[in-house]
Image (cartoon, grey):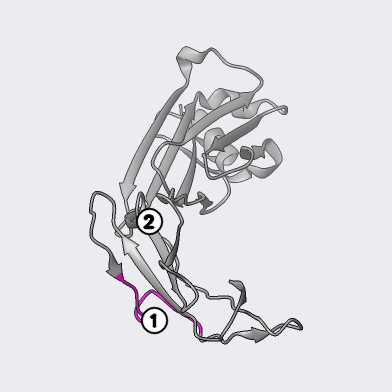
Amino acid sequence: MSRFYPDELSVDWFLKEKGKEELTNINSSGRYKIPSSSSRPQPNKTFTHTALLEFFPSPADEGSEFICRVNHPGLEEPIERTTGPLQVLGKPELQQPIKLSVTDSGDVVGCITLLNFYPKDIRITWSHEPPQNQKETSNEEKYTDNTDGTFKLDSQYKIPGKILGNPQFKMKVSWKHESMERPEHREISIQDSGEAKSKITRHIKGK
């Protein structure tokens, strides 16, 4: 707020939850922080004031509005500004690099875990080199609901173990979520997969 006089300004913050009409007054407590602030005098004898509301959004805030209401003796009616309905986004976090394991049948399984993303929709794409008949590969995805409303995804990609013996072997996974500007990816090559390759070799010899 700027160019006001006298320095008799009051600022209130309100929450309008999704689907409700009533407003809830927000105080500086719990998850909300309203830093103390004071007006700054300007060369033309008026004042400028910056008011802040700080909080960490959660999926529960999706569709809610935060409203700032300003009162001053020079106003006939209070001024209100709103955030509009909030869109909450949580960017997926990769728990660890691609992890390879070997099944009893000798197939190789690549796994990743993505944490704390919101909303639930996310696109995962697996691939490997050299190419393999798609009928011999399979994907499996398991979602878990977190207590804070975000999601966890465990994604697996299974390929025939024989391909791991190829020196050109490489497995890649990429993911895209609306919270991200561009897709992210990780990959693992034959040089990185010594333990899994050793298990494959032992499995083949065992036959």
Q: Is residue 15 left or right of residue 92?
A: left
Residue 58 visible here: no
Amino acid carrying label 1: it is Ser
Residue toward you, 34 or 159 = 34
Residue for point 58% across, 40% down: 198
The quadrant where residue 49 appears:
bottom right
Residue for point 44% across, 35% down: 156
Give the percent coordinates (x, y) of residue 41.
68, 86
SS majority, magenta? loop
The residue segment tinted magenta is 25-35
Q: Is residue 169 left or right of residue 132?
A: right
Marks 1/2 in contact by CB < 8 Å: the verdict is no
* Mark 2, residue position: 65
Cα–Cα gap, marks 1 and 2: 17 Å
* Mark 1, residue position: 28
Give the percent coordinates (x, y) of residue 90.
47, 52
Residue for point 58% across, 45% down: 195
Q: Tell which circle, 1 or 2, labels the residue nearer the N-terminal end.
A: 1
